[in-house]
Image (tube, rainbow, N blue to C red):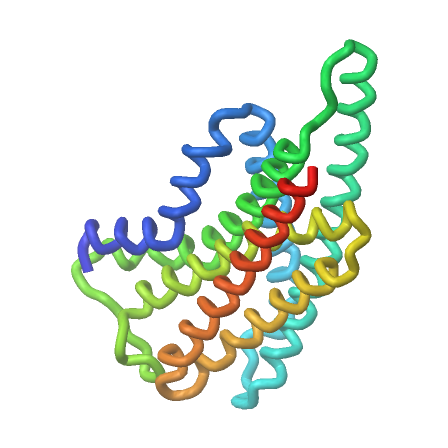
Amino acid sequence: MTVAAGIGCALIALGPSLSLFVAVISKKPFLILTVLSSTLLWLISLIVLSGIWRAFLPLKSTTWWPFALLIISSVGFQEGLRVLFWKVYKRLEDTLDAFADRVGKPRLFLTDKMQIALAGGLGHGVAHAVFFCLSLLTPAFGPATFYVDRCPQMPFFLISAIIALAFVTIHTFSMVIAFNGYAEGNTTDQYFVPVVHLVAGMVTLVNFASGGCVVGIPLLYILASLILLHCGKMVWRRLTAS
């Protein structure tokens, strides 16, 4: 591969996030701070998880269940952190609303709250892409490429970028769904997000099978499309009802 190919893989993973950042997030400094703080939070969580699992890696077993256990524990930790992130945001929202009341300014609009959730989700997605994709792309800028035996159809770096894009999409819009579920007390949305997150993580285990990426990647994008559809319907419902 070349520099152009390496940059191309990076843009596949983060290009849509960059577009979303420029079009929506960059217009409001508070949203920029939300993205940065969210990215830092999720990167720290992934580093903590990697440190915990470092004692057990590399897994010498050829069976799938140790990797499934790793995914389940990681998803559980991150979903717990999502609830904590929501509680911190809710306290900040109450503080901002109280300040707005004191100075005679309007409270946060519904669109503001959704944009904050979007910014938090974008930070989660970017952290995932940086940790699982960009950190692997350095060799992609060299003169050669790399294939794995179990997925010889595409270069490893391209597969990583495509998978990262799917997870960026899932994480970004899952946060909007989750925040709305917490705010409304909607248990369906509250459980929908961690279930999709867990299923998406489990789907990556398909890549251990020979030619598994041919099946696993489309399944990930089906889940990403499901998240987008559900988020779109939820946003439309809230905006038309308000």
Residue ID at (80%, 25%):
95
Quick one: quadrant of the C terminus?
Answer: top right
Q: Is residue 47 visible in the rendered structure shown here?
A: no
Q: Is residue 239 visible in the rendered structure shown here?
A: yes
In the rendered picture of this protein, how many numbered marks are placed on residues? 0
Residue 233 rendering spot, x and y as whole percentages: 59, 54
Residue 222 rendering spot, x and y as whole percentages: 47, 69
Return the residue nearer the eye: 26 or 47: 26
Return the residue nearer the eye: 74 or 101: 101
- Does residue 166 appear to the left or right of 239 in the view shown? left
**Vertical comparison of 105 with 155: above or below:** above
- Residue farthest along the top direction in this orientation: 103
Residue ID at (55%, 24%):
29
Residue ID at (27%, 73%):
154
Residue 213 rendering spot, x and y as whole percentages: 38, 77
Q: Quadrant of residue 107?
A: top right
**Vertical comparison of 107 with 52: above or below:** above
Residue 201 rendering spot, x and y as whole percentages: 56, 70
- Does residue 190 appear to the left or right of 152 in the view shown? right
